[in-house]
Image (tube, grey):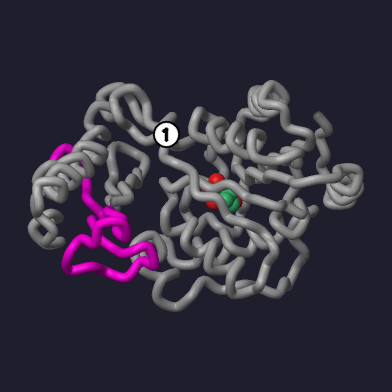
């Protein structure tokens, strides 16, 4: 595995690869969720590129940029074992210059739910993903369904900018109790981890209701809120279609039910695709 830290090195290393390139962009602190994206990318392509870059432009003032978990040595080992051909670990200076041209998230989809809570987050996320997709020359790029809104916006960006890359949506990976894996789970104490299970429990309850024929969004969301009482604060519960338009009634095969809540220090998100 080649570890490259400059954009020039990446472009040179990439030229030496012929065939399809699977790309997994990450912010490091790799866990089994990342590993499942990496494995899928490895399986479906001739070559695998992984990037690790804690992107400052997607963190808002006062968020955990400085404290974001960093585990470079372990991450390198994981990528090596997973069979990555190239691991791209740039510095901020490699990725950004002053007074850049920026990409803006779309006015509605980019500023509801996560975008409402974290205004500007998606602009920074799209900006770096555009750079990373261009740099990697990916044939396919892999993103988790856990960040459903991020996934929808990246898919829209590649469509709107006619980018020649396939965005692959990958299933959410959970621990044995049902907690969706996230790098920020390291902030949870054992008791908070137990309480955090109310997020996945609320989604399971919603699924059960849908399966038994209840499709009314308000009724489902009310029930979910009652399951979420163990959270310190429920930020949002939403039932949207795959394009993130709010749904009054669940549409089978076209619905995402989402929840965001604070448990202890971290804010957690989870969702289910129905
Ligand atoms: O999902 C993430 O880890 C980040 O938002 C991403 C896609 C790597 C961009 O920084």
Q: Is residue 216 left or right of residue 197?
A: left
- The residue tagged 1 is 173
Q: Is residue 137 above or below residue 262?
A: below
Q: Is residue 219 left or right of residue 76?
A: left
User: Is 66 or 194 nearer to us in this picture?
Assistant: 194
Instruction: Identify the residue shown where x is 64% and y is 39%.
Output: 44
Position of the N terminus, as image quadrant, is top right
Percent of width and height locating residue 195 = 22, 31
- Whether label 1 lies within 8 Å of ligand 1 gets the answer no
Residue 227 sits in which quadrant?
top left
**Residue farthest to the bottom?**
107
Instruction: Identify the residue shown where x is 58% and y is 63%.
Output: 126
Q: Secondary structure at mark 1?
A: loop
Q: Is residue 32 above or below residue 114?
A: above
Percent of width and height locating residue 134 = 74, 59
Percent of width and height locating residue 156 = 53, 68
Instruction: Identify the residue shown where x is 23% and y is 68%.
Output: 247
Q: Is residue 125 left or right of residue 21?
A: left
The span shown in magenta is 228-257
Q: Is residue 191 above or below residue 218?
A: above
Q: Is residue 272 left or right of residue 132?
A: left
Q: Residues within 10 Å of mark 1 (few under 14, many from 20)?
A: many
Could one spot residue 247 in this view of the protein? yes
Q: Quick check: is 271 in the magenta stretch?
A: no
């Amino acid at each position: 595995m080649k570890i490259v830290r400059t954009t020039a090195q990446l472009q040179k290393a990439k030229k030496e690869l012929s065939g399809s390139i699977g790309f997994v962009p990450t912010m490091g602190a790799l866990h089994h969720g990342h590993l499942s994206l990496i494995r899928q990318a490895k399986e479906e392509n001739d070559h695998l590129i992984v990037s690790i870059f804690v992107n400052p432009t997607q963190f808002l003032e006062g968020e955990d940029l400085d404290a974001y978990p960093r585990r470079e040595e372990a991450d390198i080992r994981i990528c090596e074992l997973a069979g990555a051909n190239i691991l791209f670990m740039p510095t901020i200076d490699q990725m950004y210059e002053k007074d850049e041209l920026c990409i803006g998230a779309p006015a509605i989809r980019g500023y509801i739910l996560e975008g409402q809570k974290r205004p500007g987050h998606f602009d920074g996320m799209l900006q770096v993903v555009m750079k990373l997709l261009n740099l990697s020359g990916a044939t396919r790029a892999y993103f988790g369904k856990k960040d459903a809104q991020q996934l929808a916006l990246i898919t829209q960006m590649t469509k709107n900018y006619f980018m020649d890359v396939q965005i692959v949506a990958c299933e959410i990976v959970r621990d044995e109790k049902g907690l969706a894996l996230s790098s920020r789970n390291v902030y949870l104490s054992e008791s908070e981890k137990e309480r955090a299970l109310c997020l996945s429990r609320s989604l399971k309850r919603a699924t059960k209701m849908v399966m038994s024929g209840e499709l009314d969004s308000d009724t489902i969301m009310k029930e979910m809120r009652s399951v979420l009482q163990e959270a310190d604060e429920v930020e949002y519960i939403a039932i949207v279609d795959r394009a993130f338009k709010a749904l009054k009634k669940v549409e089978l095969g076209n619905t995402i039910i989402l929840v965001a809540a604070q448990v202890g220090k971290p804010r957690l998100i989870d969702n289910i695709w129905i």
